[in-house]
Amino acid sequence: MMRPSWVSLSRTVLQRQPVRTVQAHSIDNDRLPLRFSRGFSAARPRLDEKRPSFMSQLYESTQQRIQRERAEQERYSQYQTRSMGSRFMGTLFVVVFFSAGSYYLGTLRPAPPPSSSTTPLAELPPVQHNTSVANLQAAWADFVAILGREHVSTDEQDLVSHSGSDWSSYSRKENEKPFIVLYPSTTEEVSKIMKVCHERVIPVTAYSGGTSLEGHYAPTRGGVCIDFRRMNQVLAVHKEDLDAVVQPAVGWEELNERLSADGLFFPPDPGPGAMIGGMVGTGCSGTNAYRYGTMREWVASLTVVLADGTVIKTRQRPKKSSAGYDLTRLFIGSEGTLGLVTEATLKLAIKPQSQSVAVASFPSVHHAADCARRVVEQGIPVAGLEILDDVQMRCINASGATRRHWAEAPTLFFKFAGTPSGVKEQIGMVQKLAKATGGRSFEFARDNNEMQELWSARKDALWSIMAMRRDENDRVWTTDVAVPISRLPDIVEATKKDLVQSGLLAGICGHVGDGNFHAILLFNEKEKHLAEQVVHRMVKNAVAMEGTVTGEHGVGLIKRDYLPHELGDSAVDTMRRLKLALDPLCLLNSDKVVRIERPLPGEVKEW
């Protein structure tokens, strides 16, 4: 049997459906939605409907496409307006994300080491410390765990007292105070403190006696101050080896009292109150320097805590060694910028059998300096040779610092040491030289009491100037330079003339036996510029005479910009390289000795 075809089936269906007539006015296909009209036409095709022409269909299709494109453009424009802010934020996020990622990936590969031997200041990136309150408060908890609460101080009075002193040439600044003061008692505690500071990138300033004069312990970056006052023990005295092991807060005067019973003494003798840690830091000397030398000659070895907490010992105890670099002398005079001294092995000397003092006055400071030069040239082995000018002697009388009244004239103080016969011979030789150079008087001590009385004037020089302050706003500026001994009379005379012309109350004193002398100036805020100019010219004259900008006070903040004029830029750049090698984060006593950041406009005086 043959199956019916599709056409015959469709016809049969159509024949069975009732015919429904739709009038033209009952339905308007143009008003129907497009999808409904199409669906209706498809479902109910009109067999008699006239099909539109090709051109009509094309026109209609084109018009619909144009309308559709315009609608799309309007929607896109609205999207652009609404999403401009969000797209900006998205772009910013992408940039920040990839920048941070690139930086992080860059840190995984360390920068190549420098290829030059020096580090000019211009090549140094800005120093980055973390002194935020949150970081310092978190460090406080670490320090309490190391030292105990009683040895960690944030007391305002403690912070101010560890920021400067009345006798320092550097004036305190309100924003230069430590956040916290720590009082360790052992090398191990200092090491732990430095490990915390290194990890948290907190700057550190060391403090021992607080007698320094050039702003050495000013906390220019805030952070932590380590006060060594609890580390004040004489750990050992080896009488047979002539050495002693001490902690940094041992005073030189206390040490000599301890050594006196054994017939020994430690020769360097700076100002009263100085402690071994600060004496090592500044490479000090004192009134015995002419005969016995400076601090550098009397330190055998050091125990030092480096910036990252590493502990090193620079030498053993022998008097000499040629084993490697001389790290001991590297740290002497470094002013706490390379490491923190926690122990020092000091060389000692035998106390001389006999000592005496003599005092000679002169008509001018040039005459006095000339006498000192001739004593040195003839090789007379005096133990000390000091000068005080007429202003200084007048201040000593006015302040009542000593029991006797002095001739208010330039005066030389001589200290003699040795055998009784040797001392007597030295006194006779010096007396003849004093007379030959115009000396007006010559007096020497006949016993120990007279010796202490005569020498007391020299030791009270600074305090006598401070006693002359007109009111609480007056300050004292103490500075020093040193020149070859042959130029000593010239620079002392030039400085004396400059001080007189300035109108300031100012005296001259110092260790003229080794070409080193000091100027002590009294000034107030209005006179500060005058004092600065006098000191500036004094330093310039010293450098011009092939001298040094500081003989024993150290560089600190006041003298750091003079170093390039004395030593040259390359030498200072070499010092900066040493600083960065041992303290790459610049945590230790920042800004002292060498700059670690470029100066502000006008901050450096014109040479």
Image (cartoon, rainbow, N blue to C red):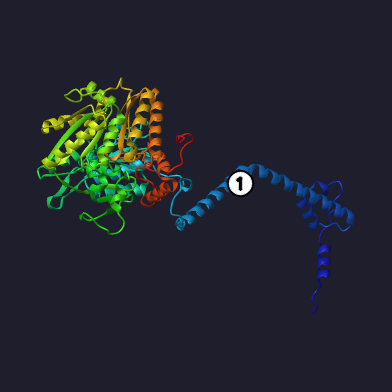
Q: Is residue 166 visible?
A: no
Q: Say which residue label 1 marks.
A: 87
Q: Against 439, is 279 above or below?
A: below
Report the number of discs: 1
Q: Against 436, is 188 above or below?
A: below
Tell me residue 582's x, y (percent): 36, 51
Quarter of the image that includes the N terminus: bottom right
Q: Is residue 135 visible?
A: yes
Question: What's the residue at 30%, 51% (across, down)?
Answer: 309
Tell me residue 174's x, y (percent): 37, 31
Going by the image, does 355 lie left or right of 433? left
Q: Of the residues shown, which amino acid type is indicated by label 1? A: Arg
Name of the residue lying farthest toward the bottom: 1
Looking at this view, is 282 or 337 the one in front? 282
Question: What's the residue at 81%, 66% (across, down)?
Answer: 10
Looking at this view, is 513 or 578 the one in front? 513
Q: Secondary structure at mark 1?
A: helix
Tell me residue 489's x, y (percent): 33, 34
- Which quadrant of the view contains residue 557? top left
Question: What's the residue at 25%, 48% (across, down)?
Answer: 297
Quarter of the image that includes the C terminus: top left
- Which quadrant of the view contains residue 252? top left
Tell me residue 133's x, y (percent): 37, 39
